[in-house]
Image: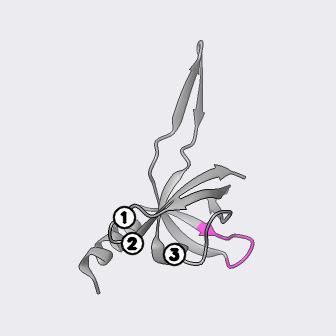
Amino acid sequence: MDPFLKSVEVTFLRHGIAAILDPDGAAVPVRLLPMQADEIADFGTMRIQDAGGMFEILDSAFAGHGKGAVLDIAGERRKVQHSRVRDPRRFKVQLNTVPV
């Protein structure tokens, strides 16, 4: 096995958050790494916090899925708006998600 792939898989296992990919179909358990901090907007004295929607997933776990795939993350359903591979070894996929 490629030692770099093993390292990435261990990182997802130890630091990733649990999610379900395609909860209404195959319901595949996956691990995600959040990529974006929560966004906070100030309106006068009021602050609005919006959960970040960028995640990384192992390419092998996302194979066969694409735009429109649904993730269930701790009871919150999010739809994949866009996915792209920026990893030079192509082990990870970045997912831009929006609440469903």
Q: Which-is-in-front pick, marks 3 and 1? A: 1
Q: What are the residue bounds of the magenta stretch?
A: 20-26
Q: How is the image coloured?
A: one colour
Count residues near mark 3 (Cα–Cα under 10 Å), then give few for <14, some for 14-19, many for 20+: some
**Whether label 2 touches label 1, CB < 8 Å:** yes
Q: Which residue corresponds to mark 1?
A: 87
Task: Kindly report the secondary structure that dominates the magenta region of the rendered protein.
Answer: loop
Count residues near mark 1 (Cα–Cα under 10 Å), then give few for <14, some for 14-19, many for 20+: few
What is the x, y in percent for residue 79? 66, 57
Task: Provide the secondary structure element on which disc 1 rests.
Answer: loop
What is the x, y in percent for residue 9? 37, 73
Exactly how many numbered labels are in the figure?
3
**Residue shown at the point (69%, 70%) measured from the top left:** 23
Please name the amino acid that badge 1 sits on.
Answer: Asp
Task: Provide the secondary structure element on which disc 2 rests.
Answer: loop
Please name the amino acid that badge 3 sits on.
Answer: Ala
Q: Which residue corresponds to mark 2?
A: 91
Q: Which residue is outermost to the left?
A: 3
Q: Which residue corresponds to mark 3?
A: 61
Q: Is residue 87 magenta?
A: no
Q: Is residue 88 above or below residue 42?
A: below
**Residue shown at the point (29%, 87%) measured from the top left:** 1
Q: What numbered label is drawn on residue 75?
A: none
Q: Is residue 24 magenta?
A: yes
